[in-house]
């Protein structure tokens, strides 16, 4: 496993299990979500959720902004964003 992938997995684990001090805003959660999806699945696919699916639509839009970003670049951005918050 590459060093970047290991660091990424550790960062994802930290965010998923963090308690107490780490309370990201909804906007920050969306950014982490989009970076995670771009890193693990690539460019967004499928139809944009309907007007009444506010959460789904926000997630789709956040992910779509990263279209064309490589998996490695998305992993690095995810790690850097988390490090900046620590």
Image: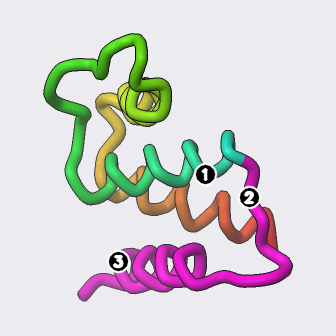
Residue 17: give x, y in percent of width and height. 57, 84
Q: Which residue is mark 1?
A: 29
Q: Which residue is mark 3?
A: 5
Q: In the image as oriented, which residue stretches furthest toward the right?
A: 21
Q: CA distance from mark 2 to mark 1?
A: 6 Å
Q: Is residue 30 magenta?
A: no
Residue 18: give x, y in percent of width and height. 66, 82
**Measuring 53% from the left and 76% from the top, which residue is drawn there?**
16
Region of the chain picked out in magenta, as a range: 1-25
Q: In the image as oriented, which residue stretches furthest toward the front?
A: 52
Residue 37: give x, y in percent of width and height. 33, 51
**Measuring 29% from the left and 83% from the top, which residue is drawn there?**
2
Q: Quadrant of residue 23?
A: bottom right
Q: CA distance from mark 2 to mark 3?
A: 23 Å
Answer with left or right where residue 45 lies relative to residue 30: left
Mark 1: secondary structure: helix
Q: Residues within 10 Å of mark 1 (few under 14, many from 20)?
A: some
Answer with left or right where residue 14 lies relative to residue 46: right
Q: Which mark is residue 24?
A: 2
Q: Earlier in the sequence, mark 2 or mark 1?
A: 2
Mark 3: secondary structure: helix
Q: Quadrant of residue 9?
A: bottom left
């Amino acid at each position: 496993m590459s060093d970047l992938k290991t660091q990424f997995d550790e960062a994802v684990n930290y965010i998923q299990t963090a308690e107490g001090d780490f309370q990201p805003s909804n906007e920050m959660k969306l950014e982490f979500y989009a970076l995670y999806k771009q890193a693990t699945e690539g460019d967004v696919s499928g139809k944009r959720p309907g007007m009444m699916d506010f959460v789904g639509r926000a997630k789709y839009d956040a992910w779509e902004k990263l279209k064309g970003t490589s998996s490695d670049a998305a992993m690095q951005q995810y790690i850097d964003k988390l490090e900046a918050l620590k």
